[in-house]
Image: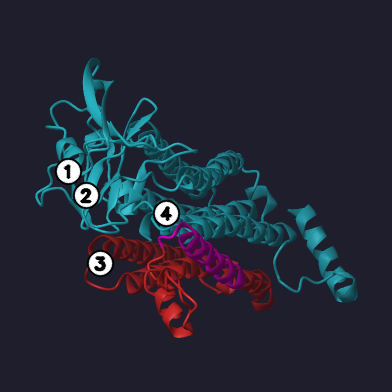
Amino acid sequence: MAHDTAIETENQTAEQHDTWNGGESPFKASYGKLMMWYFLLSDAFTFAGFLIAYGSLRFSMNAWPVPDHVFSTLPFGGENAPLIFVTIMTFILIVSSVTVLRAVQEGHLENTNATVKWLVITVIGGAAFLGCQAWEWNNLIVQEGVTIYNNPFSSHLDEGKYITLVEAKANNPSLMQMEMDVTIHNGDAHTTESLPYLVDKDGNKYFEKVNHHYFHRHGDAVEGKLVGTTDGGKVEKGEGYLIAYSEGEYFPGVYQTAEGVVKTEEMGPKSFGTLFFFITGFHGLHVFSGLVMLIVMAMNTASGFYRSRNNGHEMVEKIGLYWHFVDLVWVFVFLAFYLL
Amino acid sequence: MAHSHGLSIEEQRKADIGIGVKGFIILLLITFGEVAVAIFGKGLLPGLVLRLIMIALSLYKAYYIVSIFMHLGGEVRSMAMSIVLPMLLLVWAVIAFLWQGEAVRDSRNYVNGNDPLKEKAPKAADDRLGIQKADDLPKNISFE
């Protein structure tokens, strides 16, 4: 303490005499805190660049995967729950943002124990968020078949209705009938079934519209192949759909437009997967590095290292800024990928 | 910072908790509002209005986090401006790149021939300019 007082006295003298030599802080903020702010500014531009590239590509496409449809599954087999899981993830991040705020506030009060407590709670929140993201990625890759170079999500450019292969063949006799063997997974067991399809002269394949979980039956949850929706498999313009996927093969469904033309579902924009995984992955990397720093902060605080600096645990405040920024970026990732 | 308002530690802690709880409730309600608009808004309002509502709510959330949680609103004004003003460059970037994205879509649709406007526009233009197509020309011309 005596040492600190000596430095303070020295600083005050310096301020009085060296105003024009950097002796006074015009922003009334320490160097470290100011540099954290400017790092966050540059990081904001990095994220903005990614999100603007996403928006630019999205504006250049006629169809884009409908988020309500892409993100509609829950852990433990929950389905048809649009945006619910990502709302839970957002909730976790908001909670962790508030807990880190509490850590910073208690740090200002030089209350070491409470600061450590809130930091540890924040670490748990961040880890929970990363766990949720891991599940979401795994679900998109393994269950839905989204990869960085292809994606099965798109939306209908035409109004019409799904039809059977017999109807398609009657409408367009030039389509050739073929068959392929597909593997149906049912729990641990799997069986092989023969799946008929049609091919046109350009090599495009037409399948009967199947539920995208058909190839991975979860017990008896999926009955029958056709998506026999209540309105007879009608498709609305702009409505989202998911092309069934299994073992490297996509099964686009055949449908008939209102004008009577037989068409097959189009694959979605190729860049969707790479944009989603890269941008949410870059955000997840920030969450992870934030977690590492929060753990270091918690250990250093617990050891009394920051208490001895007697500056209101300013290091905790700097990492608090970083953590709030991670929440801030999520606001826009959430908006761009899930809401719009 | 904590002692600058002349509050005792207990009073300061009470005020701190108040800030945290208020921020938590505001952010949570706005997020629920956004999700509700995204799920239930379809068909009730035009898509553009829904999108603008969601963007406005997200911008307010961002403002709240930066201003209150990151305490930028309480810093020296010139410092806050040195961080906020460079962000205005993004206004240009968003407009420029989204505009170009849409132009790319229009061009591709025009080249691929699935431009919704195409079926009427060229024909009308032909009539207006009085251009005759080869098929419309008289087949047999004889000079007497």
Image point 22% across, 38% down: which residue? A173
Is disc 4 on the same chain as disc 1? yes
Q: Residues within 10 Å of mark 3 (few under 14, many from 20)?
A: some
**Secondary structure that dominates the magenta span:** helix
Q: Where does label 1 land, which residue?
A: A163
Amino acid type at mark 1: Ile
Q: Position of residue B91 (x, y in %)?
A: 58, 72
In screen coordinates, is B118 left or right of A155? right
Tell us which disc is closer to us: 2 or 3. 2
Q: Quadrant of the N terminus of chain B?
A: bottom right
Q: CA distance from mark 2 to mark 3?
A: 29 Å
Q: Residues within 10 Å of mark 2 (few under 14, many from 20)?
A: many
Residue that extends furthest to the front in the rendered view of this protein: B144
Amino acid type at mark 4: Phe
Camera-nearest residue between A119 and B51: B51
| Chain ID at mark 3 | B
Q: Quadrant of residue B58?
A: bottom left
Q: Where does label 4 land, which residue?
A: A337
Is disc 4 on the same chain as disc 2? yes
Is disc 3 on the same chain as disc 2? no
Q: Where does label 2 land, which residue?
A: A256
Chain identity for the colour red used in the image: B
Whichever of callouts 2 and 4 sits on the residue coming sooner in the sequence is 2
| Chain ID at mark 1 | A
Q: CA distance from mark 3 to mark 1?
A: 30 Å
Q: CA distance from mark 2 to mark 4?
A: 30 Å
Q: Where does label 3 land, which residue?
A: B41
Q: Which residues are magenta?
A: B91-114
Residue B11 in view (yes/no): no
Amino acid type at mark 2: Gln
